[in-house]
Amino acid sequence: MAGEVQKAEALKGSVESSIAKAREAQKKFEETKKQVEEAKAKAQAAIKKAKELQQKLKETQALFKTPGGVKGGIAAIAASQMGFIRGKVVAQVQKQVLALLSKFSSGCPKSKELQKIIKVRSTLINHLTSFEKRILVFQNTAAKLTAIVSIVSALIKIITSIPIPTAIIPPQVGGIGIPISIPNKYSASLVKLNKILDRLLGDAAAILAAVTAISLVIKNLKSRLESVDLAIQQCSIGEPADLNEILAVAQPPENTGSEGTPSPDYLYKNYVLAIIEDPDSPKIAPRRYAVAKDRGGTIRLRGESSFSSDTQVLLDELKFKIDNQFT
């Protein structure tokens, strides 16, 4: 009788142990299943982001591609565009900048000549700012490429770090396995995605290298034009009889805005723009600069001080600076 009781107790203990193991296995399965679903969602999100990025790249390529022009990826198009810009800058703008500087080599030009120099200088500044805007598009593209690659790479690391057991545990002990085809399917997708990311990261590096090279050329030319501006100012001070005519060309009154409600040229990306006279400049030949104010009237950004730049040039340069601060 005692033996029967012991057998019954042993069987009961075995059943309870099996039930406990089955419950534990079911719990682990549910946890693993949840991890698989999360991994699946993250993988799909990563693939979706990559596809969105590829579509944006196609749109950017279409924006810059000309019929019968450069073939290849965004890096090839960026290199071609910036090569064209650099050739134009070096061949045309640099030549004219040197010509302007040479006019001051033997002293100050006469008033009429100064007025011509001011107009040419403004035109050259406009060209350089226009080039910078075109380059900014590629710089922003490279920045977006790098950011998205970082995000998707982080997702991939999270996905691949999730432990997903694929062994089939014998059902008699309550085990449940995850079909090996599930992680294999997403592993293949992630390997492919990693290759895409490597290529995009290479494109971003190539674009940034080209942007840096051409930006240095433009910065150097703008620095030389600042020297021209200082020379114009000094020469204008020495020509008091003709100063009003020189100022009329350098700072035309019809291009200085008006009081009250700002015109569209003075509103830009939640900023109110204004032209301020530089207090450190000579009163007889004042330098001016553009500022960007927030809604509370606080100055958040300012442009370069100049004597010979007209108002539109000052505004355009500040607008470019505003665009550039968000990259």
Image (tube, rainbow, N blue to C red):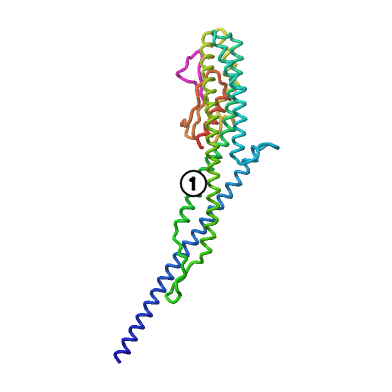
At x 58% / y 48%, what residue is drawn? 52
- Report the residue that reaches farthest toward the bottom: 1
Question: In the rendering, at what x and y percent does residue 23 appear?
Answer: 41, 73
Given residues 103 and 203, the one toward you in this image is: 203
**Amino acid beneath label 1:** Ser
- Report the residue that reaches farthest toward the left: 2
Q: Is residue 54 magenta?
A: no
Question: In the rendering, at what x and y percent does residue 72 appear?
Answer: 63, 41
Compared to residue 249, the image places residue 58 above or below, namely below
Compared to residue 80, the image places residue 174 above or below, namely below
Compared to residue 249, the image places residue 82 above or below, namely below
At x 33% / y 86%, what residue is drawn? 7
Question: In the rendering, at what x and y percent does residue 224 appear?
Answer: 53, 20
Q: Main secondary structure of the magenta part?
A: loop
At x 49% / y 53%, what residue is drawn? 156
Q: Is residue 239 visible?
A: no
Given residues 275 and 42, the one toward you in this image is: 42
| On-image quarter of the N terminus | bottom left
Q: Is residue 286 magenta?
A: yes
Compared to residue 145, the image places residue 94 above or below, namely above
Where on the picture, by quarter, is residue 67?
A: top right
Magenta region? 277-289
Question: In the rendering, at what x and y percent does residue 265 appear?
Answer: 59, 30
Where on the picture, by quarter, is residue 74?
A: top right
| Secondary-structure class at tag 1 | helix
**What residue sits right under mark 1 in the picture?**
150
Horizontal arrangement in the rendering, residue 258 relative to residue 65 (left or right): left
Q: Is residue 58 visible?
A: yes
